[in-house]
Image: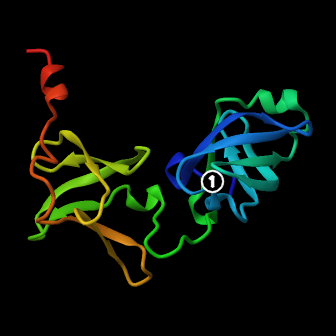
Amino acid sequence: MTGKTEAERTRLGYVLGPHGVKGGVKVFVLGDQRQFAGLDRVYVEKRGWLRVRRAEMLAPGVVLHLAGVTTPEGAGDLRGLNVFAADDELPVPEDGVYYYHELRGLTLSNAAGEVLAEVTDVLDGGHQDLLVVRRASDQGEAFVPLQAPYVVVNLDGKRRPLSLTLTEDAPGGLLDLSEAEEGGRAE
């Protein structure tokens, strides 16, 4: 399982720096810190797969104790590196909670079922997640807030995301080019 491609890994956060004197690393978590619960290993950028000896929930982040990292200096060497998990090793989230990788590649349709865009990425926007979508009409990109009641996540039989629907209540112009994009174009 060491050959997981980037598409089969989900970025969970990045290392802020050392924590304690035994090589713990403080991780800034993208999303819910509970996604670290029960992980046996994580992929650390430039270091590869490392076994998780212990994970401590430390709001709003996590402290990881990783195999081979036993000093503050060793933990400091990981500062700024991204931390990933294999998609198939993440714990099953509660109903109504979805991993970013589950939303990538899904279609976004209007209430009538017409495909408007495809989700290419999901960004942590702080107060709300943002869907990065490639519009079907012109292949341009737009940001759509993943916010109820404007976006509905349609589920499959296992209650996991199947597609997304932009409701009739959604504000107009969500998929239009922003003024910043328009002004930044060379003419």
122 or 150: nearer the viewer: 150
Q: Position of residue 40 (x, y in %)?
A: 76, 60
Q: Position of residue 89 (x, y in %)?
A: 64, 64
Residue under the image location 56 percent in, 60 percent down: 87
Residue under the image location 38 percent in, 55 percent down: 104
Q: Quadrant of the C terminus?
A: top left
Where 48 falls versus 100 (above or below)?
A: above
The residue singled out by tag 1 in the image is 85
Q: Residue furthest top?
A: 187
Numbered circles on residues, count = 1
The image quarter containing residue 35 is bottom right
Where 142 falls versus 52 (above or below)?
A: above
- Left or right: 38 as drawn, with respect to 183: right
- Left or right: 23 as drawn, with respect to 177: right
Q: Secondary structure at mark 1?
A: strand
Residue under the image location 54 percent in, 70 percent down: 93
Instruction: Indicate the amino acid at tag 1.
Output: Ala
Query: What crowding class fits label 1: few (fewer than 14 Cα within 10 Å), some (14-19), or many (20 or more)?
Result: many
